[in-house]
Amino acid sequence: QYVKDPIKFMGLEDLIPMSLNTKRMQLREILDRDVAPLLPEFIEKAQFPREVLGKIKGLFGLSEAKYGCRQVTPREKSIILYELARVDTSLATFYALTMSLVIYTIEALGSEEQKAKYLPGLCNLDLIGCWGLTEPDFGSDASGLQTTATPVDGGFILNGSKRWIGNAIISDIMVIWAKNTKTNKIEGFVIPSKTPGIHVKNIDRKLGLRMVQNGVITLIDVKVPITTRLEKATNFANGVKVVLEHSRVSIAWIATGMLSGVYEASVKHLRERIQFGVPIGAFQLNQEKLVRVLGHFHSCFLLAWRITELQEQGKATSGQAGLVKAITSLIGRDAVRLGREMLGGDGILIDNYVMKALADMEIVYTYEGTYDINALVAGEAITGISAFKSSY
Ligand code: FAD
């Protein structure tokens, strides 16, 4: 007898409403049976697994049932992310990017016209979106971005460059953040990817998140109508910040789901692998490492669960989201490394989860604000002192 599913050790499944837990187990079965075996090939080739999308189609939706889309509550979204990440981080990232960046941006900040036009297609995956904030020279310093939106008769002209944008090359629509040259405020636009003047180039040779297609988007005199502007995103705080505060919770769930995958791979290996005539789980050093992985998993799960509850009550703050994103990726990084260690040589194979997770966790640690930046967001909320700018 042993603990196969880490969620069971401290009875964490009791936190999840029964109907949601049932859905979770159904999703797990589909992912384990129909999706996981297909992925290594795409990962090796660094290809987006378009063929797999049909199997996860029903998972997408809005915060309320509208525009013909179903409702996905924060808790359901979290559990879906958890299960996807337990299988693969790229898959979970695709879900987070679609749900928490693209769909959420339009749902929270867009006009009725934009919502009716894009949300149904995004929810049933007829449309794929991307979300462009980061630029070649402005990563952590996102509010300094240089892409411009120049007001002209009936619309705007966009000029600039975006880097690292997930789904860029496969997207049908793009959310682009740019500085309005008249107001000097950062505003958002949702535009078709085929608009003249948009050029996209894939970033190749990535060693993490292999199935996510990240790209560079160049915007040269891209003329867009005024209806493409996200009407509620009137500045950085009302736009980008609102979305990131929301989506950082999703990243915490990705880290948590990954630790579930790491734990499962580790405990299986410790029981099956024989050295010195005994299963390697009989060695004290390995047991201690497994305990650390399970402890880190529980810390992540409980932090992520609590922030999701706060989000559901409309009470989650940016400081809390920053802390949870930072800490889950920090201890997640430690746990993944321990898992890799416990699997020995087998730990470097694509099929054994942990090495892939080790590389992917570096990105979880980095995207949607690095660990440092999220720590500073939380640090400011705690102390009341902003420490982002150096006096250098
Ligand atoms: P930099 O800002 O150059 O930071 C380098 C180092 O300096 C980091 O360790 C950072 O923490 C540290 N640092 C910087 N400023 C400070 C400070 N004030 N105090 C302390 N330390 C500091 N962006 C999008 O818009 N859309 C996407 O879909 C997207 N997907 C991504 C997918 C991947 C695989 C990757 C790698 C990135 C993605 N990003 C995306 C961009 C991501 O959000 C940025 O990479 C991230 O915010 C860090 O920016 P940077 O890479 O420019 O690092």
Image (cartoon, rainbow, N blue to C red):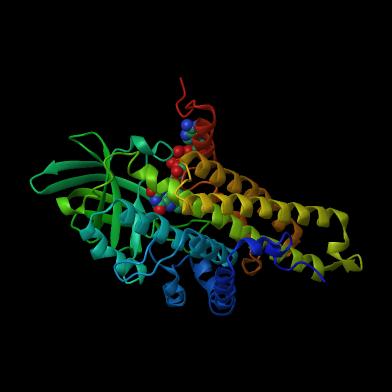
Residue 157 in the figure: left or right of residue 144 = left
- The percent position of residue 130, horizontal first and vertical second, equals 35, 57
* Residue drawn at x 43%, y 67% as measured from the top left: 48
* Residue drawn at x 20%, y 53% as measured from the top left: 228
Query: Is 385 located above or below residue 127 in the figure?
Result: above
Q: In the image shown, does 261 or 243 lie closer to the viewer?
A: 243
Residue 11 in the figure: left or right of residue 136 = right
Q: Residue furthest left?
A: 153
Query: Is 156 located above or below residue 349 in the figure?
Result: above
- Residue 224 visible somewhere in the drawing: no
* Residue drawn at x 47%, y 43% as measured from the top left: 369
Which corner quadrant holds the N terminus?
A: bottom right
Residue 115 in the figure: left or right of residue 52 = left
Q: Residue furthest right?
A: 277
- The percent position of residue 112, horizontal first and vertical second, equals 23, 58
- Residue 15 visible somewhere in the drawing: yes
- The percent position of residue 315, horizontal first and vertical second, equals 47, 46
